[in-house]
């Protein structure tokens, strides 16, 4: 891809064709420099935190996989953000936020190069990215913030399909994911599309980011099939423990840290009356979900289990992502408790139907992405902070089905769309390039087969780990 | 705990009882939106950095312990922040900052739900958290910032009691620590209590956070006793090297990074004349302490030692925490040098009296927490930056005992209080639940015994590491 | 060093001689508190991110070296920032930014203690740091931001000379690097020296930081010679794979994250029209460089290689550092592609001439530092954002040699200066202290020889790794 771009770009550059992203008309008199400055700083700093979540995903996923596949998983998690950066710049941003119709954006593609007079807002805004005309930051900041979100959706997939997918197949899927699937689904909710018009709300992306990633992961798992030896003939589940709980724990701390960018930053403005509330709800949901997942496993298996507790924390974070700005602290407390239980149940459920997800990504991101989106319809309270004024009260807050109904429709529509489209892309890649490594390579480990390399050459490995999938 | 809360909460929610934390009266005319916005951003961003210190503690502590206990230590460091989030929300915040008397806060408990018209300040403030009425940020931001500090105090304990405490015992102690011990001690100094009235100053918590954590750790060490085999019959110390200096080094870098939130953020306001000075004093103390600890060990043992140097850096950070806003750069330079020497001496001292602290937490946080608090009385100079205007000159700055005396009283009072109360909690847990794992489990490693798990299943371990404590 | 300082400092303190850094005259009427506050916050937050890059360097370098040298490399990367903090405070900051002549600063040495009325700017500024009078932040903030940059230059060296240099020799060289070499070279460009006057531009330091570090590394590599066994008699290159690709991957993510401080923060002001653009160009160059390096190695060796891809990302970041504020997004896209190819070529080139750089630091920082500086002269476009208004159009933008010529002169002059001066320091250290460990120690690993320690005592190592250099 990038190889082909190089000469084209060079030609463009030498011809002097202006492809400049983000030049500002800085002299426009209506701009409040202080407000724009503060909103820009907040949006950029939180975007940096969201970028850092790529490290968190890399470590959670590699830590929960076996050492023989470690290079491969780290590599996928590293390159996915580079691919996302390219695909979102050349295509995705325009499809998601460019003006178009209710279903797809059709302006401002190719280097996000559409007309735009940001940071002017509202009626003063003139340009092709109307769906983002509410935030008073320059276009470059809007693009960058949305890019780091797009990267997250793709990285969710990598863990679920780990330990058996070909590196090149995943590399190709990332372009489809960030260039096409995520932006179109996102356009419906954040790009002014039909779900937004219907009144569905997803503050920071339980659906847009997490369940879109989760549905794409689910279709990948289904098409790939389970790892060799994961489920034996009698249907029994063969545990394949991850190679480093240190990596996994670092990863979850990094993700929790990054989520303070993800949720409070989704204001895309220094909305001081809301961002502290959002940070607090985000945090308490992660906390109570960690504890409830820990206690659930302690009850089930007699001992507290670290990896399930870590996934509990992530489950709470995913679940609070949609409602973080719309619910009270006690509601967030309760949402977390439920999320922690849901992730434990989902892990057992997916294993029971032989959908093999080595790191539990679907249990975390899909199950709790759906649950969190639902929670807006259940717990929303427009009075909790300024950012909540847009929602209708949830079912448990006396609002009946008014807010719950659009949430349900949104969940179902996005799910069906992503399942179908991502399955189509997986099948296409399977036909053209192939999806799965050979059984020999899977047993030996993908690091040697795909990369001619191992992650830890100086350390002696336990033999059975290499043979665990036999 | 959380299991019991769930039904209660659900009832509350369904009854529509308002338990909303942090709703703002945004229309109050006296609010300076720009100032509140900037103060809120600074306080939140620095709070995120302080949250991230949990990762630092997890890695320092796990890296300095043996591989067979790694899951256990990571788990304790992970869950402690979740417990802190719950305990501080339901109880601690009100005890610490709620209006009450000189010894304890008695308002605004249970979901931090007291009356409050933040971000109004000073005379315009009306609410039950008067001790925090000086900072113009919303209540949610005050709560969140103070929460991440509370979490730090508890996490200090986990390293000191590592490699022999039962997981459940530590889990229970965390509730006591963040729900009761830390908030009451903190109320005396930061909550408008008797030490604050006496004129004691502890800018960012050498005493409030670090030595409270350190005293609680010390009582735990004393009650638990040393690890098996640490001190042999002849009184000789058996070294038990940590399993990953990579983890320990990452941890210290993360902590140093987080400290730029801890100290400069403790302004809880964008005090531009002070925060750069605080960042610079914090940094130079960490630097000179690292070098002095390194040189001290080089002199003693003939070789520079990495783990002692890392603890030297932490020692400098702990020591500068109380005086960071009150002292000049040359004073900070000197405080660091002394802190690096003190931590080396303290490690040898604690070993000599058979108080077994696997990671040196008491040497870092207790010894230097006390030393740093003292430094306010020795080096304080009210002219160094705006935030320093509240202190009296220190002994070496010509102020005599005026500032030193309240520091001494504060150190002694907090030490006595925490030693007594935390010992009481440790004994209570010992009676009710038991504190220490069996000798067999300790020798095999707590990961298998407590969690049925190991941190690195794919790697071959050195046998003697499993038997080192025999 | 610090040992000798302690008594001197104590005397100064006891005599009451004011050595106070950074006291502000806060009452000056011309200060715009909002602007100063916002600029201060942005500069400090980005400085914290740059500080965090020390962790990134520590992990990239240790991950790409062998386990037997891991403590040593972590230790070097840890202590280098402490040394930098001391050397820049006592000497370097004044040499770099103090008023002087075109070649060296000669004011404000020793605790950065010169006269200064920051945050006043321009004509209102009165003080000895005129070269920084354009940024409206307090002196403490200027110092702190510049310090974290200085630390970066020194840490680049540590990887290149790894696995054979004596710890003490590197420790001494750091003082020379941050106290003398970096500040003088930096004075020429950022301190108002002769290259600045000639019109050379290096926005965030492709030359000032990265190629100064790279040239010093190159001279070190040349004087030290290759590791034992790296090149055999037939001239064949013996690969010595790093011990943890997990560490290396974490390191690159941390560096990429930190670079969002490095480049956008180099505005040293909340220039909202520029910082988003800078973040976006920085990111896309890292992304396309990662992909082009990956594809280049895939083409060459038949398989995608993780460590080369990681170095590709770093190469893109280094290359975009000088031009990040001066070029359009398509130019940044292309600069990244080229950087990724350059780093692959450079790695093969340095090996072909038997310059042994275990981590590829010269290929990343020197080759791409030079290339990035050149890119200002090739791709600069003064219209891309407000911060670009100072440059002349580059060669490909129709500007002819106007901007390219000063870039070429700057590259050559800095290269010659650093090569000569750093070689002199390396030879001096070699004479006085010795540079290289004994062959026995090198084969056994520097961890045991230099530090009496190993990084991972609980894990069994592959024997051949200890003997790989035979």
Image (tube, coloured by chain):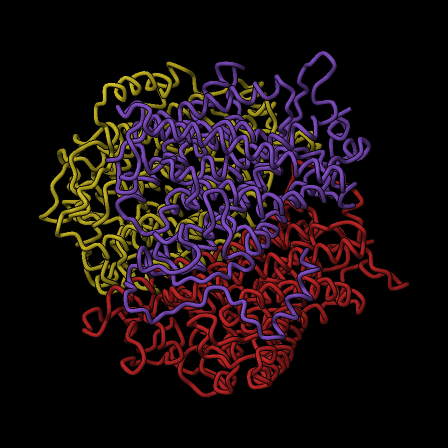
Chain colours: A yellow, B red, C purple
Residue C211 seen in the figure: yes
Q: Nearer the viewer, residue C149 or A132?
A: C149
In terms of image quadrants, where is residue A264?
A: bottom left
Image quadrant in which the N terminus of chain A is located = top left
Q: Residue at x 57, y 19 (%)?
A: C348
Q: Is residue A45 left or right of residue A303?
A: left
Hey, which residue is sitting farthest front in the picture? C101
Question: Which of the 4 quarters of the picture holds residue B272?
Answer: bottom left
Q: Position of residue C151 (x, y in %)?
A: 54, 46
Q: Residue at x 59, y 59 (%)?
A: B286
Q: Residue C208, image x and y in percent?
A: 47, 39
> Is the residue A161 above or below the residue B180 in the image?
above
Q: Residue at x 38, y 69 (%)?
A: C25
**Up-down relation of residue A383 to residue C304 (above or below):** below
**Spot occupied by residue B282 in the image (x, y as percentages of width and height):** 53, 62
Direction right: furthest residue = B234
- The answer to whether residue A76 shows anywhere in this view is no
Q: Is residue C11 left or right of residue C379?
A: right
B35, A416: nearer the viewer = B35
Q: Quadrant of the C terminus of chain A?
A: top right
Question: Is B111 situated above or below C132?
Answer: below
Expressed as whole percent of the image width and height from the top left, the position of residue C383 reads 24, 35
Residue found at the very far left of the displayed protein:
A123
């Amino acid at each position: 891809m990038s190889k082909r771009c190089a000469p084209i770009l060079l030609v463009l550059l030498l011809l002097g064709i202006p492809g400049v992203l983000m030049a500002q008309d800085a002299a426009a008199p209506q701009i409040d420099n202080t407000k724009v400055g503060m909103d820009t700083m907040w949006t950029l700093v939180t975007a940096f935190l969201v970028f850092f979540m790529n490290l968190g995903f890399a470590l959670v996923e590699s830590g929960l996989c076996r050492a023989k596949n470690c290079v491969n998983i780290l590599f996928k998690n590293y390159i996915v953000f580079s691919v996302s950066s390219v695909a979102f710049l050349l295509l995705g941003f325009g499809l998601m936020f460019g003006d178009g119709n209710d279903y797809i954006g059709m302006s401002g593609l190719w280097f996000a190069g559409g007309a735009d007079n940001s940071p002017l807002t509202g009626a003063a805004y003139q340009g092709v990215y109307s769906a983002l005309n509410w935030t008073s930051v320059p276009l470059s900041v809007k693009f960058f913030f949305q890019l780091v979100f797009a990267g997250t959706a793709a990285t969710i997939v990598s863990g679920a399909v780990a330990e058996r997918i070909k590196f090149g197949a995943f590399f190709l899927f990332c372009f489809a994911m960030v260039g096409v699937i995520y932006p179109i689904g996102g356009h419906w909710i954040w790009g002014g599309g039909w779900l937004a018009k219907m009144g569905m709300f997803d503050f920071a992306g339980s659906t847009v980011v997490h369940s879109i990633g989760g549905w794409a992961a689910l279709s990948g798992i289904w098409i790939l099939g389970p790892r060799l030896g994961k489920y034996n003939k009698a249907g029994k589940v063969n545990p394949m423990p991850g190679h480093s709980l240190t990596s996994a724990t670092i990863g979850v701390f990094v993700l929790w840290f990054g989520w303070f960018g993800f949720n409070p930053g989704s204001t895309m403005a220094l909305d001081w009356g809301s961002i502290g509330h959002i940070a607090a709800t985000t945090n308490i949901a992660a906390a109570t979900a960690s504890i409830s997942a820990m206690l659930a496993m302690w009850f089930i298996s007699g001992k507290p289990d670290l990896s399930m507790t870590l996934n509990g924390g992530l489950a709470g974070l995913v679940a609070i992502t949609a409602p973080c700005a719309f619910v009270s602290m006690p509601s967030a407390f309760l949402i977390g408790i439920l999320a922690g239980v849901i992730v434990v149940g989902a892990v057992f459920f997916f294993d029971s139907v032989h959908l093999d997800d080595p790191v539990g990504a679907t249990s975390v991101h899909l199950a709790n992405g759906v649950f969190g989106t639902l929670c807006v319809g259940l717990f929303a309270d427009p009075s909790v902070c300024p950012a909540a004024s847009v929602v209708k009260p949830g079912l448990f807050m006396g609002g009946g089905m008014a807010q719950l109904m659009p949430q349900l429709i949104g969940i179902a529509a996005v799910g069906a769309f992503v399942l179908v489209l991502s399955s189509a892309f997986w099948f296409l890649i399977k036909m053209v390039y192939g999806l799965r490594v050979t059984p020999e390579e899977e047993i030996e480990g993908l690091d040697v087969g795909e990369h001619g390399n191992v992650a830890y050459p100086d350390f002696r490995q336990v033999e059975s780990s290499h043979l665990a999938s036999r």
